[in-house]
Amino acid sequence: MTPSHSMRWPLGAAILAVIATPLFAYAAFPPARRLFPAIAGLDCDVGRVCAESPERLHQAELLYSEARQFVQDRLGSLESPPRTIFCRTEWCASYFGLSTSKAQTTGPFGTVIGPDAWLPYLVRHELIHQLQNERMGMFRLHPGPEWFLEGMAYSLSDDPRSDLGAPWQADRAR
């Protein structure tokens, strides 16, 4: 017995939805691209670190390793260390979802370190955000307060900058 035409249509639509949904998410939500950085041609180590070129991968691994040890020593271990993508070009940063910030952590999607953020304290800052996500939950963190989330990351990362710029400098002064 073969399925009738009216029974095949919902099955076909369901199969199409299963295939199209991840492709749409990958195209429409740039942080989702962090799940599969090799599609963009990035080189990744066997762990969680990726870089635009093999020549930069070792430097990225060292920055990540130092930051992870720093966070572990001061705050505790990360249960699920994020995939961390180190970009040297604006194209890469934009492709993985950076717009105005130098770096960004988006919960389970991972972290992007932009071209101007290859600095130990900025990588530590992002790993602190990942720890916040793990301990407090991404959805509980999302509504803020932003001064708490950023203040914690700035303070605990040993950020050496004397002026953080607006609005963070005003929060620091309080």
Image: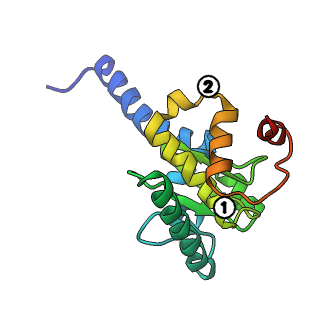
Residue 76 position, x and y percent, is 43, 53
What number is the disc on residue 96?
none
Query: Which secondary structure, mark 1?
Result: helix
Q: Is residue 125 above or below residue 174?
A: below
Residue 23 position, x and y percent, is 52, 43
What number is the disc on residue 143?
2
Q: Is residue 165 above or below residue 162?
A: above
Drawn side of residue 88 relative to residue 12, left or right: right
- Return the residue nearer the eye: 1 or 132: 132
Residue at (72, 53) in percent of width and height: 94
Q: Which residue is mark 1?
A: 121
Residue at (83, 42) in percent of width and height: 169
Give the mark nearer the N terminus: 2 vs 1. 1
The amino acid type of the residue labelled 2 equals Pro
Drawn side of residue 115 relative to residue 82, left or right: right
Residue at (60, 44) in percent of width and height: 27
Q: Residue furthest bottom?
A: 55
- Return the residue nearer the eye: 50 or 142: 142
Q: Residue furthest top?
A: 6
Image quarter in which the N terminus is found: top left
The amino acid type of the residue labelled 1 equals Tyr
